[in-house]
Amino acid sequence: MILQVALLLAGLSVASGSICCPPKQFNAFQYVNFVNSTTTIEALYYIIYDGINQRYLITGDRSNNQFLSTTKVIYDYKQRKAYSIDAEARTCTTFPLQGNFEDQQNVCVPSGAAPIGPFFYGYNKDRLNTQTYTYNSTALDGGRQRVTVVVSEADCVPIIISRTTTGGAGGNSLYTVGYNDFYPGIRDITVFDIPSYC
């Protein structure tokens, strides 16, 4: 399931530069919805994002009631390769990566994004102030994309990202991801170690 979503979502083009970015390394849960004319995917993933080394890891899949999955997928853009690793079965498959690292998770707000305005979650002193931006991009298959991002006002932490794609080989689709339990840094960098059986 993780591999299916990764292949469906691979590659975007975003203008160089950015309005803001979250911390270069973070951990978070992602609730993902993807819909097109033939597929509907809902999943809860755990992401470890390492912008310093241009890689990220995704594991877990709530749609199959297997959040604590033994499978993880490491996307290493310096090596231009991804590794789907099942630690329990001791299996590993690799596949090539396309596109640029910065474009994969849409966590940075690119410089050409238009502000839509502030949103607020909660109320009173516990209110979370956010900013919303929208921009257009082009997928690797030529599809046109409209991306809307909601980020925290203080530190650009992603809250919700929505991407509508029209045209291109992949057809029309809607992809949304909500972030939860975000924290900066990487507690255990060895999660990116590639096992000897890969």
Image: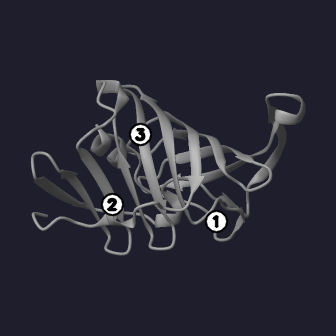
Q: Is residue 153 above or below residue 32?
A: below
Name the residue beneath numbered marker 2: 191
Question: In the picture, which quadrant includes the C terminus?
Answer: bottom left
In front of the other: 193 or 7: 193
Q: Earlier in the sequence, mark 2 or mark 3?
A: 3
Residue 196 percent across, percent down from the top left:
12, 68
CB under 8 Å between discs 3 and 1: no
Name the residue beneath numbered marker 1: 15
Instruction: Give the amino acid type for the residue marked by disc 2 in the picture.
Output: Val
Indicate which label's residue lies in the foreground, 2 or 3: 2
Instruction: Give the amino acid type for the residue marked by disc 1 in the picture.
Output: Ala
Indicate which label's residue lies in the foreground, 3 or 1: 3
Q: Is residue 142 left or right of residue 74?
A: right
Residue 143 percent across, percent down from the top left:
49, 47
Q: Gap in Å between the C-alphas at discs 3 and 1?
A: 27 Å
Q: SS class of the residue under badge 1?
A: loop
Residue 28 percent across, percent down from the top left:
52, 46
Q: Earlier in the sequence, mark 1 or mark 2?
A: 1
Disc 3 crowd rating (10 Å Cα; few below 14, some 14-19, many 20+) is many
User: Residue farthest to the right?
Assistant: 124
**What residue do we see at 9% from left, 63% from top?**
197
Instruction: Give the amino acid type for the residue marked by disc 3 in the picture.
Output: Tyr
Name the residue beneath numbered marker 3: 45
Q: SS class of the residue under badge 3?
A: strand
In front of the other: 98 or 70: 70
